[in-house]
Image: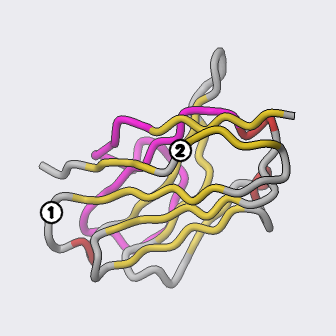
Amino acid sequence: QVQLVESGGGSVQAGGSLRLSCAASRSRYSSYCMAWFRQAPGKEREGVAGINNDGGSTSDADSVKRRFTISKDNAKNTLYLQMNSLQPEDTAMYYCAAQMWCTIATLRESDFRYWGQGTQVTVSS
């Protein structure tokens, strides 16, 4: 079983920045593909950014390209999402997800077995 704990959410004004973190409980972190998803009230969960096991390949949703950056520190068992130029439409609960023994960055929910509890991001105009 893999436990994922997100942190770093909060409230910011439009144009501001936040960095989310997701700490994983198990070893062999270098084998994990990981991703960030988000869900706004009344909307379906959507993929934001994904990264492969060694951090060499990423996949970003069009809505966050050139604003959000996903990265992975295998030595610290931690996933990050640097979010810049935040907009009110970025307001959502953000979740990290993981899948072991994979090598391809993906934003498909069904590819991920392990999920965190989420951290709230609120952007005001």
Identify which residue is drawn at 54% across, 33% down: 93
Residue 76: image x %, image y %? 29, 76
Q: Quadrant of residue 85?
A: bottom right
Q: Relative to 40, is 9 above or below?
A: below
**Extent of the magenta region:** 91-118
Quadrant position of the C terminus in the picture: top right
Give the side of residue 112 with respect to residue 70, left or right: left
Front in this rendered view, residue 40 or 60: 40
How many marks can you see? 2
Front in this rendered view, residue 117 or 103: 117
SS for callout 1: loop
Give the side of residue 109 with respect to residue 12, left or right: left
Q: How crowded is mark 1: few (under 14 residues within 10 Å), some or many (20 or more)?
A: few
- The residue beneath circle 1 is 26
Identify which residue is drawn at 65% across, 38% down: 11
Query: What residue type is disc 2 on?
Result: Gly
Magenta run includes residue 114:
yes
Identify which residue is drawn at 74% across, 37% down: 123
Residue 28: image x %, image y %? 17, 74
Which dot marks residue 9?
2
Q: Relative to 39, is 10 above or below?
A: below
Front in this rendered view, residue 49 or 23: 23
